[in-house]
Structure formats: C-alpha cells, structure tokens
Image (cartoon, rainbow, N blue to C red):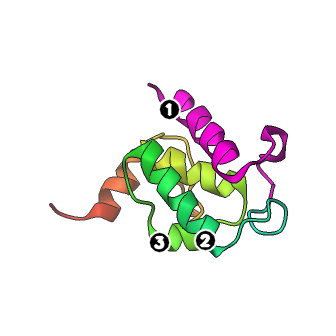
Amino acid sequence: MNEDDRLLRFRDLICERFELDPASLRPDARLYEDLDLDSIDAVDLALVIRQVTGRKIDPRAFHQARTIGDVEREVMHLLGAPDCTPASSPDGCKESSRDEQRGPT
C-alpha cells in the first residue's frame, strides 16, 4: 500500500469512525468547530493515525493540528513523504531534517 492509498484509507476511517460526510473533509475544515470533534474524538483520531501509519503522532504536532489539512500533513510526515510540511515543523519535513530531529541512535 503506497502513501496515497494510506491517506485515502485514513480519510475513509475518519469518515466511518466519526460519521462524517467525505465532502466535509476539506483541507481547511477545522477539527473542533467544523467537524464537531471533541477531546475524546481527538484520542480516537490519534488511534486512527497510528492504525494507518503504524507510528504514534508527536504530541506537540497533534496539539498544533487544527484542520484536516494539518492532520493529513502529519500523516504524510509519519509515512515518510518527502514533500510534506507538518504542522509542528514550519521548515518542512525533508528526509534529512527528520533524521536530524531523531538524533543519534
């Protein structure tokens, strides 16, 4: 499954889990105001992200995500997409910058 397929799966899971119309998942749709998600839904959203990516979202990035577009950029970041710009990193998430953030192993 490639990154585009995983992003589509992520969108499908969000629609199913939160009973949302797929048309409401615009990049500028605000999670709490437009989609009516609450703090419990936010926990479920983090679980969906982990289910799709196999990785936990950084709590700072998750806290900063305000829109579907922010969340999708984080998903792409976790999937290793080289051209994404996560909400937590205004400088982007190029492969080299992710490696630098991890530090020595």
Which is nearer the eye, 43 or 102?
43
Query: What is the CA distance from the residue labelled 3 to the residue labelled 1?
Result: 22 Å
Q: Which mark is residue 3?
A: 1
Q: Position of residue 33 (x, y in %)?
A: 83, 68
Q: Please give the residue where the numbered disc 2 appears in the rendered image.
A: 40
For residue 59, side relative to residue 14 (left or right): left
Q: Position of residue 47 (x, y in %)?
A: 48, 57
Q: Which structural element holds mark 1?
A: helix
Q: How many numbered discs?
A: 3
Q: Which structural element holds mark 3?
A: helix
Query: What is the CA distance from the residue labelled 2 to the residue labelled 1?
Result: 27 Å
Which is nearer the eye, 19 or 12?
19
Residue at (74, 63) in percent of width and height: 31
Q: Please give the residue where the numbered disc 3 appears in the rendered image.
A: 59
Furthest residue toward top: 1
Hey, what amino acid is under mark 2? Answer: Ile
Up-down: is 51 above or below 45?
above
Residue at (44, 66) in percent of width and height: 58
Hey, what amino acid is under mark 3? Answer: Pro
Q: Which range of residues does the magenta coloring cover?
A: 1-29
Furthest residue toward left: 105
Quadrant location of the N terminus in the rendered image: top left
Q: Which structural element holds mark 2?
A: helix
Is 53 within the magenta?
A: no
Occupied quadrant, residue 64:
bottom right
Q: Residues within 10 Å of mark 1 (few under 14, many from 20)?
A: some
Residue at (80, 59) in percent of width and height: 35
Whether residue 91 appears in this view of the structure is: no
